[in-house]
Image: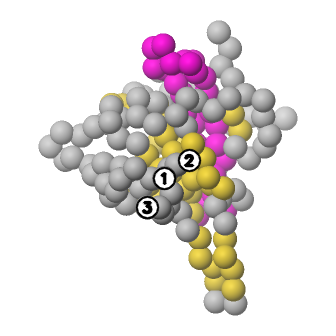
Amino acid sequence: MSNPVHYAAVATKHPLIQGVKTKKLKLIPDERGFLMEILRCDESELFTRFGQVYVSATYPGVVKAWHYHKSQVDNFVCVCGMVKLVLIDTRPGSATEGAVNEFFLGTENHTLVQVPNLVYHGWKCISPEASLVINVPNEPYKYDDPDEFRLDPHGTLPYDWSRRDG
């Protein structure tokens, strides 16, 4: 089975993984700088509930992958630098089982990506500077019982993190 890839930064004929949602973010600039809304509680198509907010820094070329959550839904936005966020649907019986989605997020593409539970995900910093990814999950992290199931980033899922030149 071939793995269709979705590129958020360009048009594609491949479908999004079932349950994945995206939102193009808008910068509101003025002479002082800019403001960018990420997620609002009145966005019924995206917001379900608040768990916590955190930021994750990733150094250039580093891969932070793979993991999924049994119940948590993630809302990722890269606010500094660029990352390649990759999702893989391994859910048995899913309409998009086996699908791979790639999203290029950050200063060149201000987009929120909502990752449903049970979908493997991870990212690679593809900018020459560190990236900062904000996550607004719908559940708080439980230190004594984490809802996080991990795999090694290389060789465990059908995805190659190396850069594709063309």
Q: Quadrant of residue 41?
A: bottom left
- The circle drawn on residue 113 is 2
70 to the left or right of 129: left
Which is nearer the N-term, disc 3 or disc 2?
3
Q: Residue 25, position in %: x, y?
A: 64, 61
- The circle drawn on residue 105 is none
Cα distance in 3D space between marks 3 and 2: 16 Å
- Closer to the camera, 27 or 107? 27
35 to the left or right of 15: left
Picture layout, residue 9 above or below residue 148: below
Q: Residue 23, position in %: x, y?
A: 61, 52
Secondary structure of residue under mark 1 = loop
**Which residue bears the numbered disc 3?**
41
**How many other residues sit within 10 Å of disc 1, few (<14), some (14-19) or many (≥20)?**
few
- The stretch drawn in magenta includes residue 90: yes
Q: Amino acid at mark 1?
A: Ser
Mark 3, mark 2: which one is toward the viewer? Answer: 3
Q: Are marks 3 and 2 in contact (CB under 8 Å)?
A: no
Q: Are marks 1 and 3 in contact (CB under 8 Å)?
A: no
151 to the left or right of 141: right
Which stretch did the figure color magenta?
A: 80-107
**How many other residues sit within 10 Å of disc 3, few (<14), some (14-19) or many (≥20)?**
few
Q: Amino acid at mark 3?
A: Cys
Which is nearer the N-term, disc 2 or disc 1?
1
Q: Amino acid at mark 2?
A: Val
**Which residue bears the numbered disc 1?**
44
